[in-house]
Image (cartoon, rainbow, N blue to C red):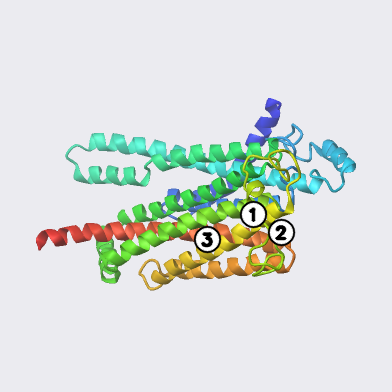
Amino acid sequence: MHHTTLAQMAVTGLLVALLPLSMVWVSSDENKYRKLVWISVFLTFDLIVFGAFTRLTDSGLGCPDWPGCYGLANPFLAHADIAAAEALQPSGPVTLFKAWVEMIHRYLAMGIGVLIVAMMAVALIQSRKAGKLAAQAGADIAAAVAAAGMRRAYAPALPVVLFFFVCLQGAFGAWTVTLKLQPVIVTIHLLLGMGLLSMLVWFGCRQDTVHQSLLPAAEQQQRRQRRYLASAPLPVLRTIRWLALASGLALLIQLALGGWVSTNYATLACTEFPLCAGKVVPEMDFEHGFHLWRELGKTAAGHYLPFSALTAIHWVHRNFAFVVVLLAGYTAWRAWNMAGMARLARGIAAVLALQTASGLATIYFSFPLAIAVLHNAGAALLVLLLTMLNYRAKHQHDTAQQGAAPARHHQ
């Protein structure tokens, strides 16, 4: 690809990131760094939903090369090549609509990459300033406290990890195209997207905690007192913490299974519920269905994938959903009246109900696009809410444990 095309795409990514960066810059929020993190969370969620739309409209190969489109920066410039490919195969993978869908998805991803680079740059610069401030503080307690606060607020470790993680995600995005939608690559690409969302949400929650720790002492004392009065016993918090972690791990497995269903186009392998092909346990081919390294629609030997393999893929995803609903639902019930977790618990319960309804609707309404996209959005929302619940459960447990230590010491 010509360096001019790469420069044009880089400018496009900067322009996409310019709007959210401008919103942060003109915001009246005193903690602009925290706002940048949460705006990145919002846009990453949007990117995942749009990525689902890209996949479900078969637009993943709308531009059959990467990072550009027929070696050019946008479908406008590549119009002649796209039109020629569409003329050869009017219902094929390359059309003008699909090309634009695919490239918009790439532009949004580039914009989020720019935001993460901005986070990393700010963290590295501010943490260096904090180090210099601490070195100059000497016996000045106020300056030392200010430096410690800056170090907590701009700790660079997670932004640096996010930078390398988004680079890895970009690499899998490229392989998704160059390896022609190989199911295992597309599924990992989906999981990495969900992982990026989870990491950004965790980062945002941590920034909220740091922001609260930098409030005036009197306000901090009032908040601590309210948390103490509303806090649950340590064993209860420990139980919720482990339940939230288990729910997150179960969701990760279900996301992988759901991605495998989507990338193998197995959604309509079972068109009834609760039965499949009129049976509780239909004929299934697990060996071919769950062989990871193979072409789309083919077995490892290069033969067409049997329908029983698609049935196995669908059936496992459908039945593991019961595990996720029961485990996450029980976790939400245990956290239902907990201070700091109640709203998250209600949100998780609502999304579980939405996911169940949208999953059934994709079967009974023969996989309509809007419902399928909604089902993917619900999965991303569940990732967001369970990540927040895990953070809250861990933070409240650790805080309660620290508070219990002095009490045991005085007894």
Give the residue furthest to the bottom: 337
Q: Which numbered disc, 1 or 3, marks the residue that appears first in the sequence?
A: 1
- Secondary structure at numbered mark 3: helix
Task: Indicate the quadrant containing the C terminus: top left, top right, bottom left or bottom right.
Answer: bottom left
Q: Where is residue 367 in the image (x, y as percent from the top left)?
A: 72, 62
Quadrant of the rendered image containing residue 125? top left
Q: Position of residue 371 (x, y in %)?
A: 68, 64
| Residue found 64% across the figure and 37% down from its top | 174
The residue beneath circle 1 is 313
The image's mark for residue 269 is 2
Observer-nearest of 284 and 151: 284
| Residue found 30% across the figure and 71% down from its top | 230
Report the amino acid beneath label 2: Ala
Nearer mark to the viewer, of 1 and 3? 1
Give the residue furthest to the left: 411
| Residue found 44% across the figure and 41% down from its top | 159
Spatial CA distance of label 2 from label 3 is 25 Å
Q: Where is residue 88 in the image (x, y as percent from the top left)?
A: 89, 40
Give the number of callouts: 3
